[in-house]
Amino acid sequence: VQLVESGGGLVQAGGSLRLSCAASGSIFSIKAMGWYRQAPGKERELVASINEGGRTFYADAVKGRFTISRDNAKNTLLLQMNSLKPEDTAMYYCVGLSQIGVESGEYDYWGQGTQVTVSS
């Protein structure tokens, strides 16, 4: 499975960005997908995820501001980010979870990341 992110960039606080993740390869093996982020000097955190059934998860820090969705026809995962804050600045990674990942408890497919920078 290959994951390629796009849509990052520089935005002012209060603005919006939409991240996209194009999936290719053995995508039938993916049980769930999500977005992680990591800021310099901080631990990596799961921002949002969506499973095969459409159930979503959001970190408390982004609830009400971010929306995760998927376009199955285009094999694309989306993250709509509204009301962005400077603390949202981070590298954002698209991730996928296979059955192996379910058993190990870790997402096992990772994209290269896209940088999001929010200026105050």
Image (spheres, rainbow, N blue to C red):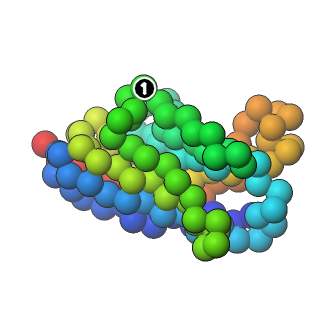
Among the 4 quarters of the image, the one containing residue 102: top right
Q: Is residue 23 left or right of residue 4?
A: right
- Residue 60 position, x and y percent, is 42, 26
Toward the viewer: 24 or 90? 24
Q: Is residue 107 left or right of residue 21?
A: right
Please identify the quadrant where the N terminus is shown: bottom right
- Residue 59 position, x and y percent, is 47, 30
Toward the viewer: 84 or 72? 72
| Residue type, label 1 | Asp
In the picture of the structure, the residue carrying the numbered disc 1 is 60
Q: Is residue 96 left or right of residue 119?
A: right
Residue at (24, 58) in percent of width and height: 10
- Residue 71 position, x and y percent, is 58, 65
| Above or below: residue 115 compared with residue 14 | below
Residue at (35, 35) in percent of width and height: 64
Residue at (61, 73) in percent of width and height: 74
Q: Mark yes or no: residue 17 visible.
A: yes
- Residue 119 position, x and y percent, is 17, 47
Secondary structure state at the residue bearing disc 1: helix
Toward the viewer: 12 or 31? 31
| Above or below: residue 33 compared with residue 60 | below
Residue at (39, 53) in percent of width and height: 80
Q: Mark yes or no: residue 93 visible.
A: no
Mark 1 closeness class: few <14, some 14–19, many ≥20 residues within 10 Å: few
